[in-house]
Amino acid sequence: MNYTTIFDSIPWPYIGNSIIQTISIYILVLLGLKIAGRRVFSERSPQDLIILLLIAEACDLGLSDERAGYWGTIASVITILLLGSLCERISWLRHLIESKPIIIYQNGHLYQKVMQQHMIEEDDLEETARQYGLKSYKEFTKIVLETEGHITGILKSSPLRKNHTK
């Protein structure tokens, strides 16, 4: 089978396959990332980079119909950009995809079940307290897991400024 180049006629049936495959992989990766949880990618460790690269490589094989060649790649790229744009512009879709901030500590009560679900340890809360210049996370009135995976502490109804030592 020959690779279809930019100078060949556009293989429309295979382009349709590429678009459908791209949409399905986009949805599956999005669901997988939601299931993995927001803390998984908020840390940005070397392991996270490896995971992202492997996901990208694995998706590459099924992203577009190989018989579509160059035009299948173009169709996949355009489809990904359109899906990203739709997710940003359609509010109900954006709310479906995005997470909401989650309270993990409030008024002396630690929500252990929520912490387990989001892979948060008490050590993470203590680290957050140190970043705010506090001795313990118990000095906070509230601790929130933000939508992007960072932990924010609130003291006396106003957020403290984090010490940026890293």
Image (spheres, rainbow, N blue to C red):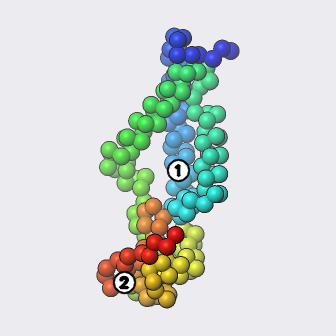
The answer to whether 131 is drawn above or below residue 24 in the figure is below
Q: Is residue 143 visible?
A: no
The kind of residue tagged 1 is Leu
The answer to whether 91 is drawn above or below residue 131 in the figure is above
Question: Label for residue 94?
Answer: none
Total of numbered circles in the picture? 2
**How much space separates mark 2 and mark 1, taking CA atoms?**
34 Å
* Residue at figure coordinates x 45%, y 31% from the top left: 78
Residues under numbered marks 2 and 1 in contact, where contact means CB atoms less than 8 Å apart:
no
**Identity of the residue furthest to the right in this view:** 1
For marks 2 and 1, the one nearer the N-term is: 1
The kind of residue tagged 2 is Leu
Where's residue 18, x and y in %?
54, 27
Image quadrant of residue 144? Answer: bottom left
* Residue at figure coordinates x 68%, y 15% from the top left: 1
The answer to whether 66 is drawn above or below residue 25 in the figure is above
Where's residue 88, x and y in %?
36, 46
Where's residue 64, x and y in %?
57, 29
Where's residue 160, x and y in %?
37, 78
Mark 2 vs mark 1: in front: 2
**Identity of the residue furthest to the front in this view:** 165
Identify the element where label 1 is drawn: helix
Q: Is residue 121 visible?
A: yes
Image quadrant of residue 66? Answer: top right
- Crowd tier of the residue under label 2, counting other residues whose Cα lies within 10 Å: few below 14, some 14–19, many 20 or above: few
Identify the element where label 2 is drawn: strand
* Residue at figure coordinates x 60%, y 49% from the top left: 52
Question: Label for residue 31?
Answer: 1
- Name the residue beneath numbered marker 2: 155
- Crowd tier of the residue under label 1, counting other residues whose Cα lies within 10 Å: few below 14, some 14–19, many 20 or above: few
The answer to whether 3 is drawn above or below residue 107 in the figure is above
